[in-house]
Image (spheres, rainbow, N blue to C red):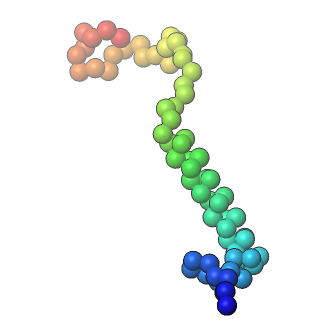
Amino acid sequence: MIVGTGILLPAEWLQTEWFSVLATFVAINTLIYVVLGVIKIIPKFRLRRSYTGASRRSETRSIHPDAPV
């Protein structure tokens, strides 16, 4: 007599709707964390700006007052 069983759960449980919903949730959650991890690893992309105009200081804030601006 051969009984269909899974490794941890009976085979009937693996075919139920709640198990497929749980498996879908785990798959989506895994994909979200993979995307977040990849975003954290890749370097930030910044556009180059010329620092002329209002975004540049007119005076140095260094402890050395003769330092270039």
Residue 13 location in percent, x, y?
Answer: 69, 81
Which residue sits at x=51%, y=35%? Answer: 42
Instruction: Point out residue 55 in the picture as x, y percentages from the top left corner.
Output: 50, 19
Identify the residue at horizontal 36%, vertical 14% (top origin): 59
Viewer-nearest residue: 65 or 46: 46
Residue 29 picture quarter: bottom right
Quarter of the figure with the N terminus: bottom right
Quarter of image, res 67:
top left
Query: Would residue 54 be seen by someone viewing this image from the given angle?
Result: no
The correct choice, above or below, for 9 with respect to 57 in the image is below
Q: Nearer the viewer, residue 36 or 66?
A: 36
Is residue 3 in view from this perspective?
yes
Across the whole image, how many numbered discs are drawn on residues? 0
Residue furthest toward the bottom?
Answer: 1
Compared with 2, 60 (above or below) is above
Residue located 62% across and 53% down the image: 31
Q: Nearer the viewer, residue 18 or 11?
A: 11
Establish if 19 lies above or below 69.
below
> Left or right: where does residue 23 sit relative to residue 8?
right
Give the residue displayed 59% in from the left and 57% down from the top: 30
| Residue furthest front in the image | 1
Residue at the extreme left: 64
**Quadrant of the snapshot with the C terminus:** top left
Q: Position of residue 52 (x, y in %)?
A: 50, 10
Q: Is residue 17 left or right of residue 63?
A: right
Q: Is residue 54 left or right of residue 66?
A: right
